[in-house]
Amino acid sequence: MATPAAWLEERGHASRWRSRMVRGLLIGIAALFLGVILLLPLVTVFVEAFDRGIGFYREALVDPDALAAMRLTLLVTALVVPLNTLFGIAAAYAIARFSFRGKSVLTTLIDLPFAVSPVISGLAYVLVFGASGWFGPWLEERDIEVIFALPGIVLVTLFVTFPYVARELLPLMQMLGTDEEEAAISLGAGGWTTFFKVTLPKIQWGVIYGVILCNARAMGEFGAVAVVSGHIRGLTTTMPLHVEILYNEFNQVAAFAVASVLSLLALVTLAIKTAIEWRTGHRGGH
Amino acid sequence: MSIRFEQVTKRYRGVPVVNDVTLEVAKGEFFVLLGASGSGKSTLLRGIAGLTDIDHGRIALHGRDVTFVNPRDRGVGFVFQHYALFRNMSIADNIEFALRIRGVPAARRRERRRELLRLVALEGMDERLPSQLSGGQQQRVAVARALAHEPGVLLLDEPFGALDAKIRTELRRTVREVQRRLGTTTILVTHDQEEAFSLADRIGVMHMGRLLETGQPQQLYRQPATRFVATFLGAANLLLGEVATPYRVRVGQAMINHASQARPDAVSSTEVVTVVRPEDIELARHRQVLANPCLGEGQVLETSFGGGVGRLLVQVGAGANLRAAARVDAQVHPGLAPGACLLEVTRTAAEAMAMPLAAGDSIALGVRRLHVLPTPVSSFLFRAPTREAVLELRQSPLVAQLVQSTRANLSETIVAEEQPGTATLRSAGLVVVDNTGRTPAEIASLVAHGARRLLCVPRGAALPRRVIIHCPDDAPQGEAMGLVASLVRHINAEATFVSVMRRDAVAAERTRVLRRLLDTRAEVRASHGLDLRTELLEGAVSEQLLALASGPDPALLVMGIDGDRAEIEAALVRDLGWLFDADARWPLLLSYSGPRPAALAAVL
């Protein structure tokens, strides 16, 4: 007959063994899932891209249309990310620091791009700025092209990526409070000094993190851009659009070659983000 | 004067969180603002620094009015509860921040930094980041940083609140020493009375946005003027007593001499609130061996050990005729007999050793010293025809707030017909009646029968946000002001003393009215420590008061009256006739300062 102690010990063994089983099983499922759903397609991109050798791959990338698409994507990103960084900091600062009428409305509006499907936001811009839209005739008279041109692409990308910086900063600023700013003011600092010497250093990692997310989305945006770009090859196709065009033309290798560049950019972004997370984690920052 | 506020008021959504605070802090003084959380003390402090805008009043630092001066130019040093060091800067950069902004050359900055770090005992920490220091060290840096630009005023907002007890005492000593050495005028905000006692030259106690009392720690502890301060600063037993002679009160069975003169208006047998500190109660096995006047005999209910002092709860049975001036929650002390009075007693370890006591022991209590509070509101007497009516009266927002905040003793008289019931009315602190459907004649009758302080609350009256005080020209105001001072502290309302003069008044008349208004304000401030707003109106009294009372925020009207029954009635009809309309919702507080019934007035 087992003593209570022995019985407990046996039970302990059993439960420990079971918990190890459960842990292994869960990790296995997660790994399998990630492999099939995430990793496999990514690997496929690179495999397909190099399907016919490095020569074909190079050729697909130096194609003028492909180069134009890359240039356009980088240009749009270079315009959108700084603008949204400024807007995002301003919006987060206003919401976290001041109380004003309509504050909750503004907070909700910031989230709007997350909630609205990108295709619909693209369509909305067409309805506003398109030839038969509200401002269409007015723009046409002055010979300003918005839709099916660079301004349209920049506008929809701005719209879609607006929340990233603001959303990243809002909780951070609310958590960090205003004590340091008040201390700076009581010590004689003015508004700008306080912002650049105290506020910005305090939230810098949040800003960088938001910029990275914003950047990734700006480069990869498809739906909204597809609606307003007009798919003019070499002129208004960004990289994601170019990939789609090539694929629809059964030019598999070229499509995957461009896609691989896009994926590479995404992976680099991800690597930077991880490095920053690691760094802030070790700094005891946010 | 180094810091001076004049009637500073700050409202949040219409409710004053800092209410007419007037204060002067002398140069080099260490002043502690003490109050529970939400009492408005931090808001007031932030108002001085300009971190919070104030809605009304003036603030002057070193004789310079800074009410509208930008916070960066006020020249104050501010220390926050959670240090608020610049986390991305080294300790050196933190401390030099104010100097760098002022363009002080590097060599002088370094010199000043070294000096400050030495002052707060943190030499050699210059290159560390705030996150590498302990909480106590961070707060030392914050103090050094706040002093870098040699501000004339140092403000500390609960600076030790986030620290452990031991570091707290240590840092307290440092702050006090630094302040003494530099002679910087300092205001520190805290909720910890021990901290206030150990640091302050002078303490100001805040409650519900008002600065209730200011004074040296000793003086506030021994001779508080308000119920709140008496119970907030240390433990206190509040007991109801009865005036015997100007310097003697009867409490329970004891007749006790006291140093402070009883309330100026008190005649023999007037009910008063007395403060007996737990350490001023003497315990003995038998009343014969007591060295001091005996309060009564009771049983030990509970004992607890507190290191240097032993704390006991003693109940004195109903038979001793001892009445508490504050209600005790019976549920908290299940052993308490009905009608018994609960007393807190502390004894030194030596005393406890000499006479060990346990729960259930019988004991005689003596009083070494007591203090009589000047408040006229010793208790509430509800007067209504039925029990339900009394309950309804108590649930009225104004009454509920007063009862809850003062914790004063309650009694109720149920009077079926309108019989005056003179004796109970006369001894009561504040008589409360329902004012729905009453006539001025009925109210006048109650006053004439002895209800010197009468609160008339109509059904559906809202909690007042304003108190409008009106004393007809010829009525003496002393008592009315004492009553207002005592009650207004328990509601979040702004008090305004109103004078109304005729439109065709001649210059001499105008001067007289204006002078009376200002004199009254100065007098109330001097003798009751309450700052009133004043307002001078022109026209018919009744009309002007109605216009004022009809403002958006609910108002309580206070009127000082005297004369006989007919005169009281006439005054009510003349000045406040509209208050007796069927749909009027204004509560009315009457303070009668006319002659007392002859029999009672004989002693004084």
Image (cartoon, coloured by chain):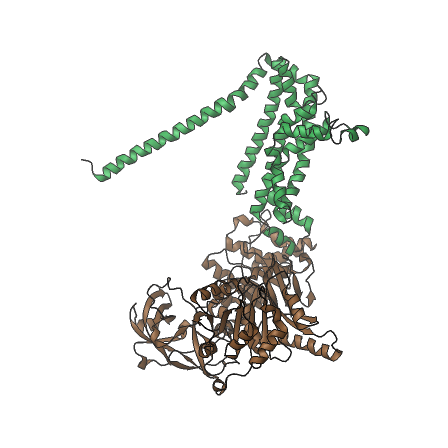
Chain colours: A green, B brown
> Observer-nearest residue: B261 or A283?
B261
> Observer-nearest residue: B243 or B57?
B243
> Observer-nearest residue: B464 or B218?
B464
Q: Position of residue B252 (x, y in %)?
A: 38, 78
The answer to whether residue B600 is left or right of residue B13 is left
Quadrant for the N terminus of chain B, please: bottom right
Q: Position of residue B494 (x, y in %)?
A: 60, 65
- Position of residue B92 relative to residue B311, above or below, is above
Residue at left 72%, top 22%?
A235
Residue at left 33%, top 34%?
A16
The answer to whether residue A271 is left or right of residue B70 is left
Quarter assignment of residue A167: top right
Residue B114 seen in this snapshot: no
Q: Position of residue A85 (x, y in %)?
A: 65, 38
Quarter assignment of residue A62: top right
Q: Residue furthest left?
A: A1
